[in-house]
Image (tube, helix red, strand yellow):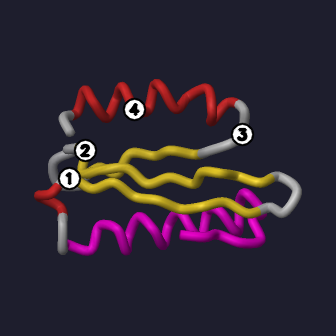
Amino acid sequence: MGIQDAYDFVDSSNSAMLRQESLVLGAYLKSTGELAGKCMLFSYDKDSKRAEIGFGLRRPGWGKGYINEAGEALIQYGFATLGLRRIEA
C-alpha cells in the first residue's frame, strides 16, 4: 500500500468517523515522518460501549514493535477518553 492509498483509505473512512462508528489513525515513524500503517477502532456499539481494534502495517515495519506501541496508545485512548468498556480483537 502506498501513501496515496493510505490517504484514500482515511478519506473514505471519514464518513464513518463523523457518524462516530469508527476511529482510524495513521501510524507514522518519528524518525522520518513516513506512514508505517494504520490502527483503528471500529464496529463501535454505542449501547454496550464496545469496539473492535485492528491494525495494518507495511511490511518494512513488521517485527519492530510498532503495533505494540500504537495498540497500547489506542487502547488507553479507547478506555480513558472514549469511555469504552470493552475492546475486542
Q: Residue at x 43, y 54 (%)?
A: 39
Question: From the viewer's perspective, is residue 33 above or below residue 70?
Answer: above
Q: CA distance from mark 3 to mark 1?
A: 26 Å
Q: Label 1 near label 4: C-beta < 8 Å?
A: no
Mark 1 or mark 2: whose residue is earlier in sequence: 2
Q: Label 2 near label 1: C-beta < 8 Å?
A: yes
| Magenta stretch holds residue 17 | no
Question: SS at mark 3?
Answer: loop
Tag 1 residue: 58
Q: Residue 9 shows which numbered tag?
A: 4
Residue type beneath disc 3? Gln
Tell me residue 18's x, y (percent).
67, 30
**Where on the picture, by quarter, is residue 88?**
bottom right
Q: Residue 27 shows which numbered tag?
A: none
Q: Residue at x 38, y 70 (%)?
A: 69
Tag 2 residue: 35
Q: CA distance from mark 2 to mark 4?
A: 13 Å
Label 2 or label 4, whichever lies nearer to me, is 4
Tag 3 residue: 20
Label 3 or label 2, whichever lies nearer to me, is 3
Residue type beneath disc 4? Phe
| Magenta stretch holds residue 78 | yes
Q: CA distance from mark 4 to mark 3?
A: 17 Å
Mark 4 or mark 3: whose residue is earlier in sequence: 4
Question: From the viewer's perspective, is residue 73 above or below residue 37?
Answer: below
Question: SS at mark 1?
Answer: loop
Mark 2 or mark 4: whose residue is earlier in sequence: 4
